[in-house]
Amino acid sequence: ALYPAREAIAADMAALRGVPAVDVEGTWLRLRALAGRVDELILFELPSLEQQRQEVPADAGWQERLSLGVQAALQKISDYIVIRRRDEPFEALMDPQWEQLVRQNLRMQIAQAQAALLAGNPTLYAASLEATRRWLAEFFDFNAADVSALDAELSELEKVRISADLPDIGRSLEAVKDVIDARHAVRQG
């Protein structure tokens, strides 16, 4: 009498076993690691004081001191002026006081992706990662290895499936319900 119910349950269990596993914990930890690296990213770089100083020998003549002074001035100017070709219009450099706000917003975008991951919302997850990549491209130095590595990791995370399409298990539920109803009908008369 239970054969049809057992057959339906076995079929639904086989369908459930065929659903690919989603590594929520591993993906969440990858996102957490990315958020931890935000403070290391380069927005803009000022030359260090050690690069700016050049010792003048005590026994140097005026011509040698003049030559070293000109070289130091040229070096200082080249540290502040960088010529790059850009296809889009140039925007002014960010004021250093806003740097932490940019970094915090980047961390919040990653946290939003984590929340979407835990909620199983693939649309919000993808949108959060896309917004994070846009912030990286807009505010951070893409020539820096850590920024391009972070972008590559975000690109890989965009490909991760965060939810699986579960099969319908209604057939086994109906079969079990029919068995229970049949048993109640027999007991009642």
Image (cartoon, rainbow, N blue to C red):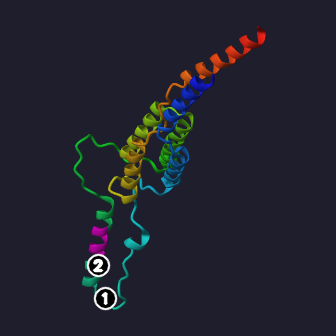
Q: Which mark is residue 68?
A: 2
The residue closer to the viewer here, 107 or 127, is 127
Residue 55 is situated, as x and y percent measured from the top left of the image, at 37, 82
Q: Residue at x 50, y 42 (%)?
A: 22
Left or right, 47 with reference to 168: left
71 in the magenta segment: yes
Left or right, 177 with reference to 130: right
- Image-quadrant location for residue 58: bottom left
- Image-quadrant location for residue 70: bottom left
Identify which amino acid the numbered label 1 is placed on.
Ala
Distance from Cα at disc 2 to Cα at disc 1: 10 Å
Left or right, 178 with reference to 161: right
Residue lying furthest bottom in this view? 59
Q: Nearer the N terminus, badge 2 or badge 1?
A: 1
Residue 93 is situated, as x and y percent measured from the top left of the image, at 37, 48
In the rendered image, the vertical position of residue 141 relative to residue 188, given as above or below: below
Q: Which residues are magenta?
A: 69-75
Residue behind mark 1? 60
**Disc 1 element:** loop
In the rendered image, the vertical position of residue 29 relative to residue 187, given as above or below: below
**Disc 2 element:** helix
Identify which amino acid the numbered label 2 is placed on.
Leu
The residue closer to the viewer here, 20 or 59, is 20
Q: Please report contact status of discs 2 and 1: CB closer than 8 Å, yes or no.
A: yes
